[in-house]
Image (cartoon, grey):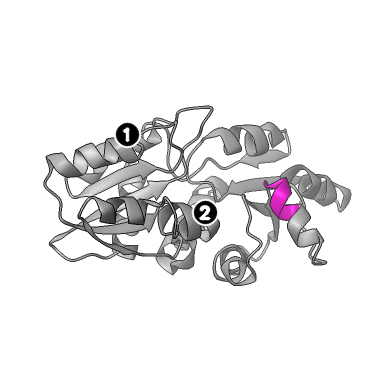
Amino acid sequence: MTKQAILLASFGSADDEIRAKTFDKLAAELSAAFPAFEVRQAFTSHFMIRKLARRGISIDTPQQAIDNLRGAGFEKIFLLPTHLTPGEEFDNKIKICAADDVKIIPPLFSEDCATPFDEKILATILDCFKRADDEDLILIGHGSPHRHNPVYENLQRLAGDKVHIGVIEPSDTPNFADMLKRLQACRADKIVLAPLLFNGGVHVAEDIAGDGDSWLNRLAAQGYRVRVIRDGLGTFESFRKLYVDKVRRALIVP
């Protein structure tokens, strides 16, 4: 029988609780859904890998994990990224791992965000981040200083008037200035901030809701009433199930 594996690749986190609630839970759910497959994890962030190594926690890069699986006799590897969009991190750390024995499963959101599955993802996200009828929701993704990703604008077209898509990187768009114009145009008042990220981590603690120049403080300074949802999407079972479904389609498992 051919030995096959699913390699779950994430940016990573040094926070034990966040890893347990997101990556580890998804890995366990993949193992339960596909018992014939070995499930392993890798991080794309060398910073996170080094930080964990100093605490005695060892985790591979995607290429190291692939090499180890090959050495153990695995003949087919399905590489599943938790990165939501095909951005710089995906291009530089995931895509380059493609090979005859390595199938890359694309990120959840495609660049055109036009498929029924994209609509299902958005509906799942909105169900995770519940809000009152008089609240507008801002979903804040990472963005990139090097390669603009059209996913965010395309996702905005799916999202409607009271859901707004922004990015943390100030050199990318839609950035905070773009968001402020949009909020003013739609006369928003009450705002819910939520991370468009698999694991919120430092981006929530600093960029979204930190004590300094965060989106929370800047919006509050403009007179908006703001509350923050701090959990990343990977903490929600319904969102993790989207990855299980994506793997199932990639494997053509009934």
Q: Is residue 101 magenta?
A: no
Per the image, the residue denoted by label 1 is: 153
Between residues 225 and 51, which one lies in front from this camera angle? Answer: 225
- Whether residue 1 is visible: no
Q: Determine which residue is flagged by label 2.
A: 248
Instruction: Tell whether 68 sits left or right of 84.
Output: right
Q: Position of residue 145 (x, y in %)?
A: 51, 31
Extreme top residue here?
147
Q: Quick check: 69 left or right of 181?
A: right
Q: Is residue 152 visible?
A: yes
Q: Which contiguous range is marked in magenta?
A: 44-49
* Residue 143 pos. (x, y %): 46, 38
* 47 inside magenta stretch: yes
Residue 142 horizontal/vertical position (percent):
47, 44
Q: Earlier in the sequence, mark 1 or mark 2?
A: 1
Q: Tell me where residue 111 appears, x and y as whole percent.
A: 42, 32
